[in-house]
Amino acid sequence: MRLLQHNVTRFQTAPRITRYLRRHPKTGLPQPHVEALVARQFAPCRLQDHYHTTLADDLMYLTYKHQPSDVESKPPRQIRLKFDPQDPYSKLRHNPPVGGSQLGKKPPPPDEASNVVRLEGIQLHTMVKEALNNKTHLLTALMQMRAITGETYRGGGIHGVEGVQVVRGKKSAGGWIRPGIPCGAKVDLKGQSMYDFLGTLVEFVLPRVREFNGVLLPPSSASVNTPAGVSGVVSFGLPPSAMVFFPQIEVNVDAYPKLFGMHMHFITNARGVGAQDKARALVSGFQIPFLRR
């Protein structure tokens, strides 16, 4: 007992462990002695499991185009001037592009099991015209985005995405917007938060939107070789009246003085000719309907 009294001091303060940890240069938060911390999902994601168990195999079958291995695909004709820094003639000269854009004519990569079309991210953004005169009007849009997505700006210190961001003007347009003026909000979703938002959208919001028969498709006579047709991004929007159908806003709709509509961009890994059709097949597999008039 006497030995214990000499070794233990009453009301002794705990040692400061954080002084041995390095701190993040931007946030100032202590970092552990590892290169990276990988946060796993804390709950099973139904839509993510649905993609890996069912949807990926179906998309591989629906979008597969056989390309014989013994036949080499002809590369597109190169009609742009190439800048060669070793050429003394073009080293210090202006090199403008000529011949038009070849983006809509690039062939897609060969279909394999490793590059089946998949959802890489969802971007939401809204435009607030009232913020051009008074930037306090952005508070409602930021609250709305944070409630719907559960994201905040650099939430938790080190984060995989930026969270809800303020969109600022990049150049003058028509005299009513100037560079650096806040004019909207946006958020990028990846991983489990992306599938959580998608599940809320298809289960609670779209079925309750009045007179919504599906995302309108372009006419069948439209060209598929446009830059938008080879990007693999599906975009559509929701009006302000549809924001009240999100459960996160519906429980406390009186807290928002005004609701704003938003545009949604479903970003996939599809590239090349026919990428838009692959992206629509993927999005329709998540119960988002399409309509062609």
Image (cartoon, rainbow, N blue to C red):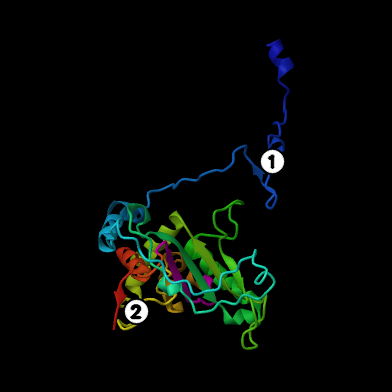
Residue designated by label 1: 22
- Asked whether 263 falls inside the magenta stretch, the response is yes
Residue designated by label 2: 216
Question: Relative to the observer, which residue lies in front, 252 or 171?
Answer: 171
**Image quarter of the N terminus:** top right
Q: Is residue 10 above or below residue 134?
A: above
**Gap in angstroms between the C-alphas marked 2 and 1:** 52 Å
Q: Is 9 situated left or right of 137 in this image?
A: right
| Residues at discs 2 and 1 in contact (Cβ within 8 Å) | no
Res 234 seen here = no
Where residue 217 sits: x, y (%)? 34, 78
Where residue 228 sits: x, y (%)? 43, 75
Q: Is 221 situated left or right of 91 in this image?
A: left
Q: Can you tell which quarter of the image residue 81 is in?
A: bottom right
- Asked whether 212 falls inside the magenta stretch, the response is no
What residue sits 29% from the left and 84% below the top? 293
What residue sits 46% from the left and 68% below the top? 249
Furthest-bottom residue in view?
A: 174
